[in-house]
Amino acid sequence: MNLPSVYIFNWLFLLALFPVAFFWLRRAYRILIQRDFSEVALKKGVAPPNAEHYAPYEMAINLVGGVIMVGVLVAVLGFQALASEDWIAVAGVTLWMKLLASFALSRHAHGQGLGRKKG
């Protein structure tokens, strides 16, 4: 049963992909082109002391996520090539995987990865 509220939430999610893709691609651009490492592997807003070491990984995470989001937007709005369930699945998995990968990278960069002991 497709209620009108389902369509509204689908459109809101689709419209939310625009700023998400923009910010991710902008972060990748800042790291790759401008060599700005201030947003690399942040933990509580603070970059690790050796942020340039983790910059390629953060740039790749943001670039892949942003390109996939732009691909979803083009496929849905430009070509109407994806069904509603398909683009929501692709966008949702991409969103969560990017967030989890960035979180894991930030914890690893700040020395709180697996196998680390405080001491």
Image (cartoon, rainbow, N blue to C red):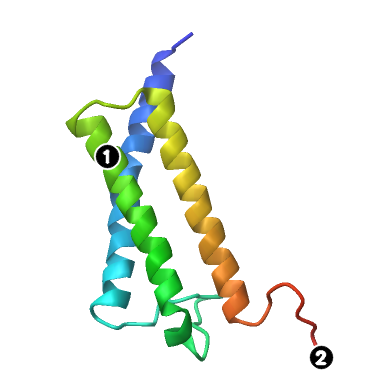
Q: Name the residue at 37% across, 25% down.
A: 8
* Residue 21 in view: yes
Q: Residues within 10 Å of mark 1 (few under 14, many from 20)?
A: many
Circle 1: element type: helix
Q: Nearer the viewer, residue 112 or 4?
A: 112
Q: Quadrant of residue 5?
A: top left
Residue 18 position in % (x across, y down)? 28, 47
Residue 83 position in % (x across, y down)? 35, 23
Q: Name the residue at 41% across, 78% down.
A: 55
**Amino acid at dot 2:** Gly
Residue 95 position in % (x across, y down)? 46, 48
- The tag earlier along the polypeptide, 2 or 1, is 1
What is the C-alpha distance between the residues marked 2 and 1?
Answer: 48 Å
Which mark, by number, is residue 119? 2
Vertical relation: 107 (above or below) 21 = below
Q: Which residue is mark 1?
A: 73
**Amino acid at dot 1:** Leu
Judge from the rendering whether residue 114 lies leftward or rightward of residue 61; answer left or right: right
Residue 84 position in % (x across, y down)? 38, 24
Circle 2: element type: loop
Quadrant the C terminus occupies: bottom right
Q: Nearer the viewer, residue 54 or 103?
A: 54
Q: Residues within 10 Å of mark 2 (few under 14, many from 20)?
A: few
Judge from the rendering whether residue 32 lies leftward or rightward of residue 41; answer left or right: left
Judge from the rendering whether residue 104 lies leftward or rightward of residue 2; answer left or right: right
